[in-house]
Image (cartoon, rainbow, N blue to C red):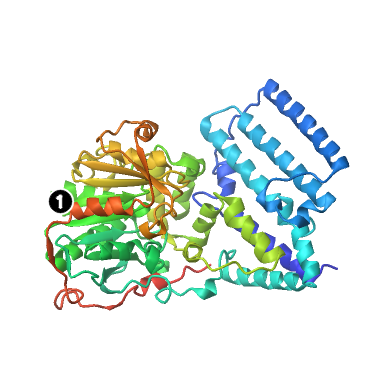
C-alpha cells in the first residue's frame, strides 16, 4: 500500500501541476490547443535538420555511454551540482541522459518551421515539459534528496510532507518563509497615512523626510496585478522612501484587492474612479495646479490612459510622467505573446467579459512558469523532497501575495492592448467615453526599461519613446522586471545605460549601440530629472491631508493592501 509520504508527494505534484495547467492569460491548455474552434498550428520539420539532430543525438549518446563506462559523467547544471549526484554512477548517468534528451527536444522545437507565434508556442510548451521532467523533481531519482533522507533518518521526508500539506492549505508553492513577514511591520514600513479611499483604491500620503519639498507633488501608480509595496519592501530598497528623501511630497495608489463586489468592474472604472480620481485628489489636497506622476508596469498603462482621457477633455493636470517597465505599444510583448490570439481573447470575453474574477493565484502561476526552473521546480524540490524551509526574502513574499482582477477589466485589457494594440492608434481606443490620442500627452517623460525583462521586453519599454511627442529620456537598467527597478544606489549593484544626444532611433538595438554604460543604480539619474520637473522648494507640510475634506483615515500602509486573495 502507498505510504502517507507517497500520497503526500502525489498531492504535492498535483498542486504543482494544477498551477501549471491553470497558468493564466489563457491557460496552458488554451495556449497549446487554442480556444474552442481554433485551428491547430501548421508546423513542419525539415528532413535534413531532423537527420542532423538524429546523428548528433546518436553521437552524443554513444559518447555519454563510453564516458560512463570509464567514470561518472560530468554534469554541468545547478540542479545536479551536489556530490550526491556526481558520486553516484546511476544518478550521474540519469542526469546526463536527461540533459542530452532536453537539449535534443529543445533543438527539435527550434527546428520547427511555421508562423512565428506557433513556433514560440512549441518552444514554450517543450520548455515547460522538459523542466517538469527533470529527474531532480522526483524522489525516486533525486540522489541529493535520498541522501538527505538517510542522513536525517527520514526527518527531511516528514518535513517535506508537512510542507506539502501547508502549501495545499495556502494554495500555492512557498517561495519563502511567509511567516516571517507582515505588511506594515517589516515590509511596507515607510511612515505615512491614508488620506482618501473609495471602492477602488486608498491614497497614501507619506511623511516628509526633508524640511522643504518640491511644490509639485508626486503621485505613484503601481500595477493593480500586484500589491504596491514592491515599491516599499525594506527601508534600504524602498523607491517610495527614496523619493520622499529626495524632497518629493509623495502619494501612492494602493489598489483594493477585488472581491465578488467588484466582479463587474471595467477598465473605464479603473481609469475614471482610480487613476483620474487620484490625480484630482492630490491636486485638491495639495492645492497644486499640476503634479508629477509615475506608473509602473500595468500602472503605467493605466496612468497613460488616464492622461489621454484628461487630454481629450482639455485637462493637463500632470506636468511630467515616469514610466517604469511599461507597455504602451504592445507590438513587442515577449514570451507573453504565446498566450494571446483571437480565439483565446474571445474565450475570455465569453467567460468573464460581463462579470467574474480572474483569480490571483492563476495569474501568479502564469508568471512563475515563465521561469519554471527558478520559480517553480526549485521550490518543489527544496520544500517537498528535501524538507527545507526556503530562506526569508521580501521580494518573494511580495511575489506570493497575489491579487485578483475583475473579469471585464481583464477582458478589455487583453483585447485592446495585447491583441489589437489600440492605445497607440489615434482614436482607435475609447476610454471613459473619449476616443484617446496619446500624441496629446505632450509633457516631459522619463522611460525606464530592464535589459533582461521577460515580462516587458526592453524593446517594448523603448517603444514608448516613439509614441509621445514631448521631451523624453530613456534609461536602460540591468537585470529583470523587478530587480532592475528595485536597485537602490547604496547597493552599488548592476549598471545602467543612457545616451544624452536626444536621439531615439526606431530600433532599440540602435539606441543601445549609441548608449554609455555606467556602473550602479539609475535612481540618481532619475532623481535629478524628476527634481528638475518639481518646481521651487516650499516648506514641508506638518500634517497629513488638508482640512476636514482629507483627514487621515488610518496609518500607512492602510487596510486595502492587507486583504488577501482567496485561493
Q: Residue 398 at x, y = what percent?
A: 46, 64
Up/down of 100 relative to 399, above or below: above
Dot 1 falls on a residue whose secondary structure is: loop
Q: Label 1 belongs to which residue? A: 316
Mark 1 neighbour density, 10 Å: few (under 14) some (14–19) many (20 or more) = some
Q: Quadrant of the N terminus?
A: bottom right
Q: Residue at x 57, y 39 (%)?
A: 121
Q: What is the residue that sits farthest to the right in this orientation?
A: 69
In this rendering, does residue 432 appear at all? no
The residue closer to the viewer here, 475 or 21, is 475
Q: Residue 230 at x, y = what percent?
A: 40, 62
Q: Quadrant of residue 97?
A: top right
Q: Residue at x 22, y 47 (%)?
A: 308
Q: Residue 366 at x, y = what percent?
A: 53, 53
Q: Residue at x 47, y 62 (%)?
A: 395
Q: Is residue 478 left or right of residue 514?
A: right
The residue closer to the viewer here, 521 or 139, is 521
Q: Quadrant of residue 52?
A: top right
Q: Is residue 541 left or right of residue 338?
A: left
Q: Quadrant of residue 276?
A: bottom left
The residue closer to the viewer here, 173 or 211, is 211
> What is the number of callouts on the image?
1
Q: What is the residue that sits farthest to the top in this orientation?
A: 48
Q: Residue 76 at x, y = what percent?
A: 69, 45
Q: Is residue 11 left or right of residue 167?
A: right
In this rendering, does residue 381 appear at all? yes
Q: Is residue 452 left or right of residue 231?
A: right
Up/down of 517 relative to 303, above or below: above
Amino acid at each position: 500500500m502507498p505510504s502517507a509520504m507517497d500520497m503526500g508527494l502525489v498531492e504535492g505534484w498535483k498542486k504543482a501541476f494544477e498551477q501549471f495547467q491553470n497558468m493564466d492569460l489563457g491557460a496552458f491548455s488554451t495556449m497549446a490547443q487554442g480556444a474552442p474552434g481554433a485551428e491547430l498550428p501548421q508546423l513542419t520539420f525539415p528532413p535534413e535538420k531532423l537527420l542532423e539532430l538524429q546523428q548528433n543525438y546518436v553521437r552524443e549518446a554513444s559518447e555519454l555511454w563510453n564516458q560512463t563506462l570509464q567514470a561518472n559523467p560530468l554534469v554541468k547544471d545547478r540542479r545536479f551540482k551536489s556530490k550526491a549526484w556526481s558520486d553516484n554512477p546511476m544518478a550521474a548517468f540519469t542526469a546526463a541522459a536527461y540533459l542530452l534528451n532536453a537539449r535534443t527536444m529543445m533543438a527539435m522545437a527550434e527546428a520547427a518551421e511555421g508562423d512565428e507565434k506557433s513556433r514560440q508556442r512549441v518552444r514554450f510548451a517543450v520548455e515547460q515539459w522538459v523542466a517538469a521532467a527533470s529527474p531532480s523533481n522526483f524522489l525516486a531519482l533525486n540522489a541529493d534528496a535520498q541522501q538527505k533522507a538517510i542522513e536525517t533518518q527520514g526527518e527531511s521526508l516528514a518535513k517535506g510532507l508537512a510542507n506539502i500539506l501547508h502549501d495545499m492549505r495556502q494554495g500555492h508553492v512557498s517561495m519563502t518563509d511567509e511567516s516571517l513577514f507582515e505588511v506594515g511591520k517589516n515590509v511596507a514600513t515607510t511612515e505615512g497615512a491614508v488620506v482618501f479611499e473609495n471602492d477602488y483604491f486608498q491614497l497614501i500620503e507619506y511623511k516628509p523626510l526633508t524640511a522643504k519639498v518640491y511644490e509639485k507633488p508626486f503621485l505613484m501608480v503601481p500595477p493593480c496585478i500586484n500589491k504596491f509595496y514592491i515599491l516599499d519592501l525594506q527601508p534600504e530598497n524602498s523607491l517610495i522612501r527614496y523619493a520622499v528623501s529626495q524632497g518629493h511630497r509623495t502619494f501612492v495608489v494602493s489598489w483594493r484587492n477585488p472581491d465578488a463586489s467588484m466582479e463587474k468592474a471595467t477598465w473605464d472604472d479603473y481609469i475614471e474612479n482610480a487613476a483620474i480620481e487620484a490625480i484630482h485628489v492630490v491636486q485638491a489636497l495639495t492645492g497644486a495646479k499640476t503634479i508629477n506622476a509615475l506608473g509602473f508596469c500595468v500602472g503605467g498603462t493605466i496612468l497613460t490612459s488616464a492622461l489621454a482621457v484628461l487630454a481629450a477633455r482639455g485637462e493637463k493636470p500632470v506636468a511630467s510622467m515616469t514610466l517604469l517597465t511599461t507597455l504602451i505599444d504592445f507590438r513587442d510583448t515577449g514570451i507573453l505573446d504565446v498566450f494571446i490570439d483571437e480565439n483565446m481573447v474571445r474565450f475570455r470575453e465569453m467567460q468573464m467579459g460581463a462579470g467574474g474574477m480572474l483569480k490571483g493565484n492563476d495569474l501568479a502561476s502564469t508568471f512563475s512558469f515563465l521561469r519554471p526552473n527558478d520559480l517553480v521546480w526549485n521550490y518543489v524540490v527544496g520544500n517537498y523532497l528535501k524538507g527545507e524551509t526556503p530562506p526569508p526574502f521580501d521580494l518573494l513574499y511580495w511575489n506570493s501575495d497575489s491579487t485578483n482582477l475583475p473579469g471585464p477589466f481583464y477582458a478589455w485589457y487583453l483585447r485592446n492592448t495585447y491583441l489589437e494594440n489600440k492605445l497607440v492608434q489615434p482614436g482607435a481606443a475609447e476610454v471613459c467615453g473619449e476616443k484617446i490620442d496619446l500624441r496629446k500627452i505632450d509633457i516631459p517623460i522619463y522611460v525606464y526599461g530592464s535589459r533582461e525583462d521577460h515580462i516587458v521586453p526592453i524593446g517594448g519599454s523603448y517603444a514608448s519613446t516613439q509614441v509621445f511627442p514631448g521631451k523624453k529620456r530613456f534609461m536602460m537598467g540591468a537585470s529583470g522586471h523587478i530587480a532592475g527597478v528595485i536597485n537602490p544606489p547604496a547597493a552599488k549593484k548592476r549598471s545602467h545605460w543612457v545616451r544624452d544626444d536626444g536621439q531615439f532611433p526606431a530600433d532599440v538595438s540602435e539606441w543601445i549601440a549609441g548608449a554609455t554604460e555606467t556602473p550602479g543604480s539609475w535612481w540618481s539619474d532619475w532623481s535629478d530629472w524628476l527634481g528638475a520637473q518639481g518646481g521651487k522648494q516650499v516648506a514641508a507640510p506638518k500634517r497629513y491631508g488638508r482640512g476636514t475634506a482629507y483627514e487621515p483615515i488610518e496609518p500607512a500602509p492602510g487596510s486595502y493592501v492587507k486583504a488577501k486573495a482567496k485561493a
